[in-house]
Amino acid sequence: MRSRDTRGRDHPADSDPWRSDFQRDRDRIVHSRAFRRLQYKTQVFANDEGDHFRTRLTHTIEVSQLARAAAMRLGLNEDLVECIALVHDVGHPPFGHRGEDLLKELMVDHGGFEHNRQGLRIVEELEVRYPEFPGLNLTYEVRESIIKHSAHYDRSKVPLRFHSDAAPLLEAQLVDEVDSIVYDCHDIDDGLRSGILSLTQLQEVPLWQGAWREALEASPRATPEKLLIDRALRALMDSFLSSLVDQVQANLTSRRITSVAEVRAHDGQLIAVSQSMRLAKEGLESWLFEHLYRNWQVNRVFHKARRILADLFHFYADHPDSLPPIHAARAEGAGLFRAVADYIAGMTDRFAIDEHRTLFRS
């Protein structure tokens, strides 16, 4: 995808002498309030559990860095990839996936909730940057890629303006795949830092066995364990990235895909790791699910988080006069429950905890 081939913006804007359209999008995203709030939103470990655990913001930066490196190796549009990576998580509510799961339950009879759709809503409606229109006025391709980033997307949930029958761009598929890779590698790192995971346990995972062996072979004797872990994580990420690049090149060659139009017409995922790597990756993710994501310490924090968000949701639904004026005004057009969901989804972990304390302390 070449920058000059963009379909443009909903609201015309003068050209910039120094930046391409996608570079301008990147800057608009980085300067948005929704992006800044990612700093205080949970990835896996709650924001107040330690200074070195990943947040939505650090995860986003890491995805952007790796996705851009992969795009360079594949000859894709690096600026577009960077935009998609930077914006891909802005629709997440506080407290990670557990927060999203709760909002899905609470909104099931009110239009539903899904973080990609919420991300699109944020950049098109909720961010206020210009007096003439709502939203960030991002290019078509960036907005489309928020809602359509995997070949397996639900076409019934894609707005018609984004051509629900057309496959996602390679740049969007790449960010989706890299997002998953970064999750796996960095959840191992945070799990080890927290003490929930141990190196002994990780030896059960074939992918980790290979990465750890490579780290040992490449390091001098008496290397501190922390540095060995860092080296093993780099080896694991490198193996994912190499498999991804090799498989994508093979996919494009075997299917004779040489243009964006052919990508759009292709039915199926073009950006993926090899089948053997995919199976090994699925094994790692199953192991993480059992040993990290379902750990009692993690669950305890998120049960508390669910209660906080549920209390806030019901309070604002019952007392709409307690909503901030901008959200109360949105309730008139979008409906009360959507306005409440917008407000809660935009909260950081810290703000939600403080708001709950203010409203419910005895």
Image: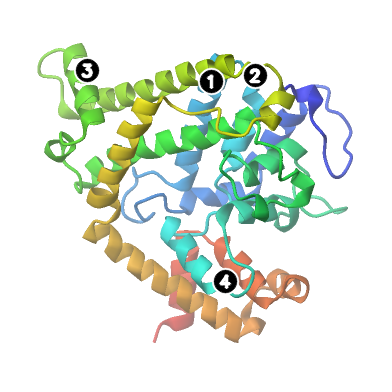
Label 3, secondary structure: give it: helix
Label 4, secondary structure: give it: loop
Q: Are marks 4 and 3 in contact (CB under 8 Å)?
A: no
Q: Amino acid at mark 4?
A: Met
Q: Which disc number belongs to residue 214?
A: 3
Q: Residues within 10 Å of mark 4 (few under 14, many from 20)?
A: some
Real-space CA distance between mark 1 and mark 3, rounded to the nearest whole angstrom:
28 Å
Q: Are marks 2 and 1 in contact (CB under 8 Å)?
A: yes
Instruction: Give residue 169's position: percent from left, percent from top.
Output: 66, 31
- Name the residue that disc number 4 marks: 107
Instruction: Give residue 219's position: percent from left, percent from top.
Output: 19, 14
Residue 139 shows in the view: no
**Residue at screen point 41% across, 35% down:** 182
Real-space CA distance between mark 2 and mark 3, rounded to the nearest whole angstrom:
35 Å
Real-space CA distance between mark 4 and mark 3, rounded to the nearest whole angstrom:
47 Å
Q: Which disc number belongs to residue 281?
A: none
- Name the residue that disc number 1 marks: 251
Earlier in the chain: of badge 4 and badge 1, it is: 4
Q: Amino acid at mark 3?
A: Glu
Q: Residues within 10 Å of mark 3 (few under 14, many from 20)?
A: some
Mark in the foreground, 2 or 3: 2
Earlier in the chain: of badge 2 and badge 1, it is: 1
Mark in the foreground, 2 or 4: 2
Q: Are marks 2 and 3 in contact (CB under 8 Å)?
A: no
Q: Are marks 4 and 1 in contact (CB under 8 Å)?
A: no
Label 2, secondary structure: give it: loop
